[in-house]
């Protein structure tokens, strides 16, 4: 009987260790990019059976997001020293009304944001497109899904403000929106307003959704991936909570969400919106998922953004720090 108990105990320990080793691989792949630079093309549906088995045991291999498209307008490449060295593109509008700093999403780069930049330029605003760490021309090979990237948001804001710009907007999609929210929570930036596309509610929720998309039960895998990914990348993901960050955001905010979004729920969006104490607007796009809204809703997106830019400039509330 004792021998049987020892065998069972050892088996459980072995399974526990192996499971954590596998999860540690997944956590690392979730927060780190490979050396190959190309556009990451998603989905296990495109993988062979062998690739799927490798993915199960070793995680999803993420290529480094590259800047494969350059702006059609004249631009200047700017390098800023933050927690890593960042590469940015600065584009100027004629008789600019202000500057919009633009931040991309997870597994993205600044070249993904050129169409947004084009629209802001047409509306008369300078733009600064930013590669977060691990993406495009910036240093590093890791991502913290908006956690450490918040410091990079502050660096870019400080740079634009140091040039004498008084009318600064922060625009971000998905992870970029989350990084902006954390930066405002941590640093109380004095931007004119925020434009946030589809930020997730909590780190746990967004990891759980990705697990479900792979056909994996998120309990307890999502929490284990967060633990190992955070440990390997030097941050505590369980405290990464945009729904809480929203409570500190008193700046005018335009929140945007696609009604077919499978990665960010309506409940998460509503929670963020409800927690915003300052002037706020929520706009949704019925046929869009977790994606760029401009191709399907160009005129609506431009009109919503233009109205927000026109009306938010005088709506900054007094800060209580």
Image (tube, helix red, strand yellow):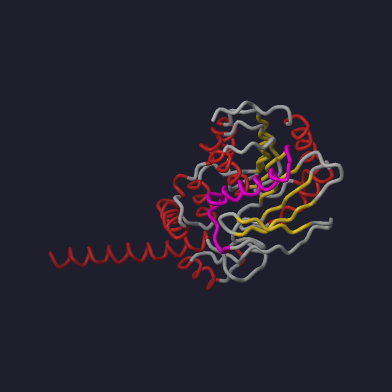
Q: Is residue 279 above or below residue 44?
A: above
The residue sitting at the right extreme is 94
> Which residue occupies 65% across, 57% down?
108
The part of the image, by quadrant, that contains residue 143 is: bottom right
Q: Position of residue 280 (x, y in %)?
A: 65, 30
Q: Is residue 186 left or right of residue 163?
A: left
Q: Position of residue 106 (x, y in %)?
A: 60, 54
- State the count of labels: 0
Q: Position of residue 152 (x, y in %)?
A: 60, 51
Please name whichever residue, 161 or 70, is drawn nearer the observer in this view of the structure. Answer: 161
The residue sitting at the left extreme is 1
Please name whichever residue, 316 or 178, is drawn nearer the observer in this view of the structure. Answer: 316
> Which residue occupies 53% across, 54% down?
144
> Which residue occupies 57% across, 63% down?
140
The part of the image, by quadrant, that contains residue 227 is: bottom left
Instruction: Let me know if residue 143 is in the magenta part.
Output: yes
Q: Which residues are magenta?
A: 140-167
Q: Quadrant of the N terminus?
A: bottom left
Please name whichever residue, 61 or 220, is drawn nearer the observer in this view of the structure. Answer: 61
Instruction: Let me know if residue 320 is in the magenta part.
Output: no
> Which residue occupies 13% across, 64% down?
2
Q: Quadrant of the C terminus?
A: top right
The part of the image, by quadrant, that contains residue 11 is: bottom left
Q: Is residue 299 left or right of residue 253?
A: right
Q: Position of residue 53 (x, y in %)?
A: 49, 69
């Amino acid at each position: 009987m004792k021998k049987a108990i020892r065998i069972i105990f050892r088996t459980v320990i072995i399974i526990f260790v192996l499971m954590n080793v596998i999860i540690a691989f997944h956590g690392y792949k979730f927060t780190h990019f490979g050396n190959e630079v190309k556009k990451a093309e998603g989905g296990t549906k495109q993988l062979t059976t062998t690739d799927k088995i490798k993915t199960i045991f070793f995680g999803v291999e993420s290529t480094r997001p590259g800047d494969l498209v350059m702006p059609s307008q004249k631009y200047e490449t700017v390098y800023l020293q933050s927690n890593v060295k960042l590469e940015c593109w600065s584009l100027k509008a004629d008789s600019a009304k202000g500057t919009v700093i633009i931040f991309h999403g997870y597994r993205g780069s600044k070249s993904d944001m050129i169409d947004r930049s084009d629209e802001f330029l047409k509306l008369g605003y300078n733009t600064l497109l930013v590669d977060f760490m691990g993406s495009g021309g910036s240093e590093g090979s890791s991502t913290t899904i908006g956690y450490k990237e918040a410091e990079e948001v502050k660096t870019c804001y400080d740079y634009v403000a140091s040039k004498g710009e008084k009318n600064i907007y922060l625009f971000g999609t998905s992870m970029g929106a989350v990084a902006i929210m954390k930066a405002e929570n941590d640093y109380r930036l004095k931007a004119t307003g925020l434009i946030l596309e589809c930020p997730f509610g909590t780190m746990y929720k967004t990891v759980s959704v990705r697990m479900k998309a792979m056909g994996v039960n998120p309990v307890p895998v999502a929490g284990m991936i967060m633990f190992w990914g955070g440990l390997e990348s030097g941050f505590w993901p369980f405290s990464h909570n945009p729904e809480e960050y929203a409570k500190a955001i008193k700046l005018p905010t335009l929140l945007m969400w696609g009604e077919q979004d499978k990665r960010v729920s309506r409940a998460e969006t509503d929670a963020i919106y409800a927690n915003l104490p300052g002037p706020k607007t929520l706009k949704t796009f019925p046929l869009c998922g977790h994606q760029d809204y401009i191709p399907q809703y160009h005129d609506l997106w431009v009109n919503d953004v233009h109205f927000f830019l026109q009306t938010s400039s005088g709506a900054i509330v007094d800060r209580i720090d």
